[in-house]
Image: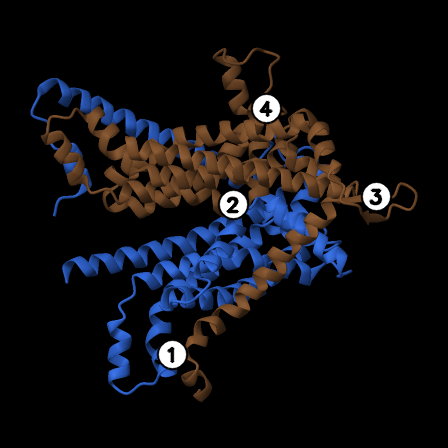
Chain colours: A blue, B brown
Amino acid sequence: MTTAAEVVSAPAPRVRPSLLAFVRRHVLTVYSLLVFAYLLLPIVVVVLFSFNSPKGRFNVVWNHFTLDNWVNWDAVSGIRSSIELSLEIAAIASLAATALGTLIALALVRYRFRGRGATNMLIFLPMASPEIVLGASLLTLFLSVNAQLGFWTITIAHVMFCISYVVVTVRARLIGFDRHLEEAAMDLGANEWTTFRKVTLPLLAPAILSALLLCFALSVDDFVITNFNSGATVTFPLFVWGAARVATPPQINVIGTAIFAIALTVMIVNVAVQMGRSRKGTTA
Amino acid sequence: MGFIHRHRWLTPYLLLVPGLAWLALFFVVPLGFLAHQSLEVQNPIDYSYAFKWAWHNYSDAISTYEPQLVRSFEYAAIATALALVLSYPLAYWIAFRGGRWKNVLLLFIIGPFFVTYLIRTLAWETILSDNSFVVSTLKHIGILGPNDRLLQTSTAVVAGITYNFLPFMALPLYVSLEQIDPRLVEAAKDLYASSAKAFLKVTLPLSLPGIFAGTLLTFIPAAGDFINAQLLGTSDQYMIGNVIQSRFLELTDYPTAAALSFILMAIILAVVLIYARALGTEKLTG
C-alpha cells in the first residue's frame, strides 16, 4: 500500500528540486510545530497556574508552587454548587438532545419524505447562527411567557443547540451503514422492532455515544446562551465570568485542568480503540 | 404496531416530530419574538414596550453602533484569515505526513476545546499581561517598545478570537485534505508539474470545500463574539456582541438589542452568500 507520506517523500528525479523539497519539508514541519506550540501554550498556562499561590486576588503572576488549590478545590464559595449544577444540566440536556437528534437522523437517512429539504435547513440554521442571537431570542420568548429563568430554561436552551450536532454526528455513521445486516436479521424472522434493538442500535452505539459526549461537553462549556437564560442561577462558566471581574482564584484553573484531563482521557481511549480496530482490520 | 404497519408513510414524521418540535418552539418561534421585539418602542415613563412597527430602531441602531459593527466584521475577517494561514499548513502536514499518528496529532488541534472557553481566554489574559514572559521577551528583542502593551489592544482581541476558533478552521481543512488521493498529486508531477504548480492546480482546488466550511465556521462565531473583547480588550475594542449583550442584560433596551441581533445575522448572511458565490466561480474557472 502506498501511503501519503511515501508519495510525498519519494525522491524527485531532478537534483535541485529535491534539495528544495528537502528544505521545504522541514519548513513545513517547523511551522506546524510552532502552531502546535501556540495551540498548547494557554493549556500549559492553565495547568501551571493551578499550582500557583498567587500574591493578590488575581492569579496572573507566578509566585510559588503549591498543592493547596488542588486539596481545597472547593474553598471558593459557590464553585462547588456551580459545578454540580453544570453537570446536572449537561446530563439531562445531552440525554434529551441525543434521543431527539438520533430520531431525526434516522428519519433523514432512512426515509424519503416531503419536507426533507426544510428539515435539513432547520438542522443547519442553529449551527450557523451566532450564539448571541440564539441566546437573545430565547430570552425574549421566556420573558414574553413570563417563564421563571433558571435550571429549566438553561436546560431547554442546551437541548436546543445540541440537537443539530447530534443529527450531524449520527447521520454520518448511518450513511456508511451496511443495510445487509438488517436485511439478514429480517430474513431470519426478526420483526422491525427486534431488528432495530438487536442490530441497528448496537451498530449505531459508537455514534450515539460520541454525540452524547459532544453534547455533554458543549453544555458544560456553554457561556453565551446560558448567560442570557440563567436568571440568578450560576453554572460553572457563569461562575468563572462573575469571578473574573473581581478576582481569579486558582481553583478556577484546578477545575479547568480537571475538565481538560477528563476530556483528554476520554478522547485518548476513543483514539486507542479506533487505532486498535483499524490495525485489526488491516491484518485480517 | 398495527397502526404503524398500515401507515408506513407516517414513520419518518413520527421520528421527526419530537426533535423538530423542539427546534421550532425554541429556535424558530423565539426568532419571531425577537423580530417582534425589534419593532417595539419603549415608553420612557413606565418603561413598558409597545409594538409600533418601529423600523427606525434599525437605522438608529446602525448609526449609533456603526463603529462596533464595522469593528466586529473587521476583527472577524482578520481572525479568519489568520486562522486559515496558521492552520492550512498544519492540516496539510497532518494529512500528508501524519502517517499513523494522524489521530494523535488531531488531538492537539482540538486540545484547546477541552479547556473551558472562558478559562482559556483568561489564560490569554495571563499570557499577554504586562509583565508576562511573552511580553518581556517581545520587548527584549525589540518588537515591542518599552512602554507598549499587548493586553487591552486590538491585537490581543484578534489574537484571542483567532485562538478560540482556530480548531473550527483546522478540522474541516484536515478532513478535505485527508480525502485527497495522493496519486493525483503524483500524476501531476509525472506530467512535469513542479511541486508548487501541483499544489496550486491539484491540492488547493480539491481542498476548497474545507476552506469554505472552515472559513464559515470561524467567521460566524467570531463576528458574534464578545468574550474576547470583554476580557482582552477595553471599550475601545468592543464588538457588536458586547453591545447586544449589555443592551439586553444590563440596560434592558430590548428593541435596540433585538434590532442589532438581526442586523448581525443579515450581514453574516450577506457575507456568506457573497463568499459562496466568489468561491464557487473560482472553483469552476480554476
**Picture coordinates of residue A236, whole percent (x, y):** 63, 51
Which mark is first along the chain, 2 or 3? 3
Q: Are marks 1 and 3 in contact (CB under 8 Å)?
A: no
Q: Nearer the viewer, mark 3 or mark 2?
A: 3
Chain designation of label 1: A
Residue B68 found in image quarter: top right
Specify the label residue B42 is tagged with.
3
**Which residue is nearer to you in this view: A231 or A267?**
A231
Q: Quadrant of residue B186?
A: top left
Q: Earlier in the sequence, mark 4 or mark 3?
A: 3
Residue flagged by tag 2: what amino acid is it?
Val
Q: CA distance from mark 4 to mark 1?
A: 55 Å
Q: Which residue is pictured at 76% across the width and 55% down the height?
A: A143
The answer to whether residue A44 shows anywhere in this view is: no
Q: Circle 2 sits on which residue?
A: B115
Which amino acid lies under the numbered mark 3 shown in the image of this protein?
Gln
Mark 4: secondary structure: helix
Judge the density around disc 4: few (<14), some (14-19), many (≥20) Cα neighbours within 10 Å: some
User: Where in the figure is residue B232, as x and y percent of width and height?
Assistant: 62, 30
Could you confirm whether marks 3 and 2 are on the same chain? yes
- The answer to whether the residue labelled 2 contacts the one labelled 1, judged by CB atoms less than 8 Å apart, is no
Q: Secondary structure at mark 2?
A: loop
Mark sitting earlier along the chain (2/4): 2
Nearer to the camera, A96 or B210: B210
Q: Nearer the viewer, mark 2 or mark 1?
A: 1
